[in-house]
Amino acid sequence: MNKSHNLFFEPLNDSNKKEWNSFVFKHYDSEIFHLAEWASIYAEAYNYLPYYYLVKDNNSTIGILPLIHQKGLFKNILATPPCGLLINDIENYKQNIYKFCLEIKTRVKASDLALYNYYSISPDMITSTENARLIKLLPENLEDLDKDIGKKHRRNIKIASKYGLNHNIYNPDIEIVNAFYKLYASNYRDLGTPVNSKKFFLKQVEYLYDYIKILVVKKNRMPIGAMWLFVFKDQILSNEAATRRRYFHTRVNDYRFYHAFKFAIENSFYIYNMGRSQKNTGAYFFKKSWGCCDEQDYPVHRLSNQTGIQEKRKKYNHIIKIWQKSPVFFTNTIGPFIRKNFVLD
């Protein structure tokens, strides 16, 4: 057990995993990414080393500190999962926690520290707010949902119905994961972005099965759209989504969002988290158009100044164009290697 001033940092292990997750479930600001299972998911999918600690003041647990050492050929950062740390009364503890993070960074010889918190724990860290999360506050019933989403979306959903779109929401068995991944991989190729490995999704299913639903939209039995949904506490999070671009005219994107909202309301969820989007992009404005959205900055705090997302895309624009024209089997093979070994925002 490590001690830093008045705090104790107790490494996560089998004996205190229940205590970790109990703290997560009780904390108002917790997300599914705070669960202890992500330490195993990242370790087994990508061979990243987790440094997960219960933060204790005397014998009282006051927080959790989840850190992953993401090391590859051109990547060597110590970072939280996309949720940040979770600390009660952070103002009283942030100086000691920051010092402890730096100690781990030095020990593992990481080149940078990246924390996805809604607050900064040190003035020495540089904050980027290029991204935002859009949270839809759901009405109590489907009738109010139809009123809430606006005339344009109601029209697009009718168009989707005329094209004969239908959907199912599945528990994540191997057949459904394969169908989702095929769409996801093709969609990411079209975007010019390297994919996560299928193993990363399979490990999520292995460790978080009860928290995952997969919505699949079909036309004439062919999957043309999908969403990887996390159900946690009182909200649903749309973590990943994909669409076959040649079916955009069927309004499949409107269709899948609408039916994800319906599923949430029918199952008594109050919040629909649409996930992270880069501000002032098409995806960002599409999500905002659904009405009753609470926009939250999604900052990342780092020790080193980073090039902005748009600047990076301009720098690698020629590579992105080549990637978009490459066969999917090639991008599926190379993409996870790139994702593991390079820094990607």
Image: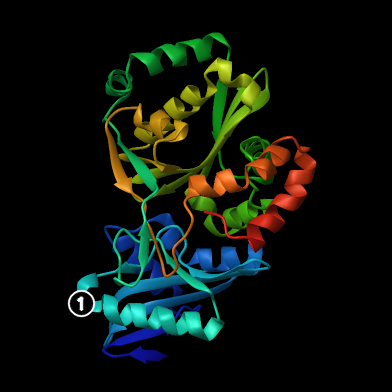
Where residue 40 appears, as percent x and y from the top left, is: 57, 68
Residue at 38% from the left image edge and 77% from the top image edge: 54
Where residue 198 appears, as percent x and y from the top left, is: 68, 51
Where residue 42 appears, as percent x and y from the top left, is: 58, 64
In this view of the protein, which residue sits in the foreground, 104 or 76? 76
In this view of the protein, which residue sits in the foreground, 252 or 345? 345
User: Against 318, is 91 above or below?
Assistant: below
Residue at 61% from the left image edge and 52% from the top image edge: 201
Residue at 58% from the left image edge and 63% from the top image edge: 41
Q: Viewed as shown, does residue 4 lie left or right of 259?
A: left
User: Against 33, is 266 above or below?
Assistant: above
- The way the protein has been coloured in the rendering is rainbow
Q: Can residue 283 be seen by looking at this rendering? A: yes
Q: Mark 1 points at which residue?
A: 92
Helix or strand or loop: what does disc 1 sit on? Answer: helix
Kindly indicate the quadrant of the structure image that contains residue 328.
top right
